[in-house]
Image: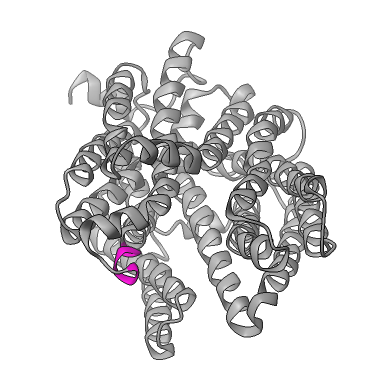
Amino acid sequence: MSTETALANRPVAFDGLEAERRRWAAAAIFTALAMASLDTAIANIALPAIAADLHASPADVIWVVNVYQIALVATLLPLAALGEIVGHRRIYLGGLLLFTLASLACACAWSLPSLLVARVLQGLGASGIMSVNTALVRFVYPGRLQGRGFGYNAMVVAAAFTLGPTIASAILAFGPWSWLFAVNIPFGLVAVLIGLKTLPRTPRAAHAFDFPGALLAAACLGLFILGIGSAAHHARPGLVVTEIVSALLLGWVLIRRQADSPAPVLPIDLFRRPIFALSTATAICAFAVQGLAFVSLPFYFEDILGRTQVETGFFMTPWPLVVAIMAPIAGRLSDRHPAGILGGIGLALLGLGMVLLAMLPASPHVLDIVWRMAICGCGFGFFQAPNMKALMSSAPADRSGGASGMVATARLTGQTIGAALAALCFGLVGREGATVALVLGAVFAAVGCGMSVLRLVATPQSGT
């Protein structure tokens, strides 16, 4: 066995990186995370330009977003499991390099099929980044600063979503849609070079990678996201039912197959830990609120309140902006106070904000909208970092990959469920569906708040 392999396989003997190396490693981690998060937002803005340039219909061009999301979500857990075996550093750098090269392929795409292939590869690269993102943060920051690290992590995602539409609009004002993807290339290459020098070599598990289990997990999550997306786009009921039922059956087979595995691809071993299970469920509820809000609010502002598209864009900004401000603060607080309390307070504020938005008067002043959106952002930002820390710290260090994969899976699953439920609300009650979606979001926030508080009485298990 080589010296490098022996070092990689030995137990963790350090508590985070020294300050200088930690700053550079964090720069590499957060640059890649920002790129992967931005790419979801900017692709939506570019769809009309892509459709016009590639002579594609709106129904076809939406797959530019869909294939990226399906490839991303379907492979999160398999890549997280692989990271525990080959090292989170390799998965992260490999995903970042693939994402960067796929961005070049997207920029050079000459037809819709070529762009879709490149977007699938880009989604796989983004999955490599996101699947082990929080695991690396756990190893980069010492225990006393991990809440702060997770706070920065949440801040980067929020800032990416805040700035994404603005950045995309600015780029499209000066150049073609291909520039939206080309801009990733220099940042990706720089992040790879920094990461090669600074990212830590994490411990590696001795068990073999479960390829059949990984395929089952990918098919299960891919079909689930596809089914929810089909429902949101009002596909034939038979198709939606087939996709959802197939996903559930594959999930059942996966759970039965890996029931006795020490490190299953779907981390059912971690769900036996009450704090982990409650933190994951809380995350799904919170991100479902976000999905409900971000789909329904533009229609609410424009169709019910009669605001313009420009005004709507302005009204949507306070939420992620305040999240970016609150996340580091909540992260620091989580190093000293229980996540159950912080998360409960955050989700209570989020639910209050959703109710206040649903109760807006017919002709509200600008400030009436802004302060309500700010309350939502304050609550969501106050919840996110403490919940992430609770979820990661409740898992053993050698299962950081599985826990990290669930952080990203819970976020994307919650957002997708929320978006689909918002679409269902519109389908059932028409333009008033926006108000119903906001009230439903408040219900999800209340459920999440209750589960967060339950962590105060749940039996803790050591994550070490």
- Image-quadrant location for residue 463: top right
Q: Quadrant of the C terminus?
A: top right
Left or right of 340 in this view: 14: left
Residue 246 visible, this orientation: yes
Residue 191 image offset from top left, x and y in percent: 33, 24
**Residue at left offset 76%, top offset 42%:** 342
Residue at the far bottom: name it: 238
Q: Position of residue 146 (x, y in %)?
A: 59, 28
Magenta-tinted stretch: 58-63
- Give the residue drawn at x 37%, y 41%: 172
Note whether residue 398 is visible.
no
Is 86 covered by the magenta stretch?
Answer: no
Q: Which residue is more in the foreground, 245 or 354?
A: 354
| Left-right relation of 400 to 338 | left
Rendered image quadrant of residue 115: bottom left
- Which image quarter: residue 229? bottom left
Our reading of the magenta stretch's main secondary structure is helix
Q: Where residue 75 sits: x, y (%)?
A: 33, 55
Q: Nearer the viewer, residue 267 or 461?
A: 267
Q: Answer above or below: position of 4 versus 55.
A: above
On the image, the x and y values in percent for residue 178 come to 26, 43
Q: Which residue is found at the position 47% from the left and 19% from the top?
A: 14
Q: Is residue 403 above or below residue 142?
A: below
Comparing 317 with 414, the one in front is 317
Q: Nearer the viewer, residue 346 or 314?
A: 314
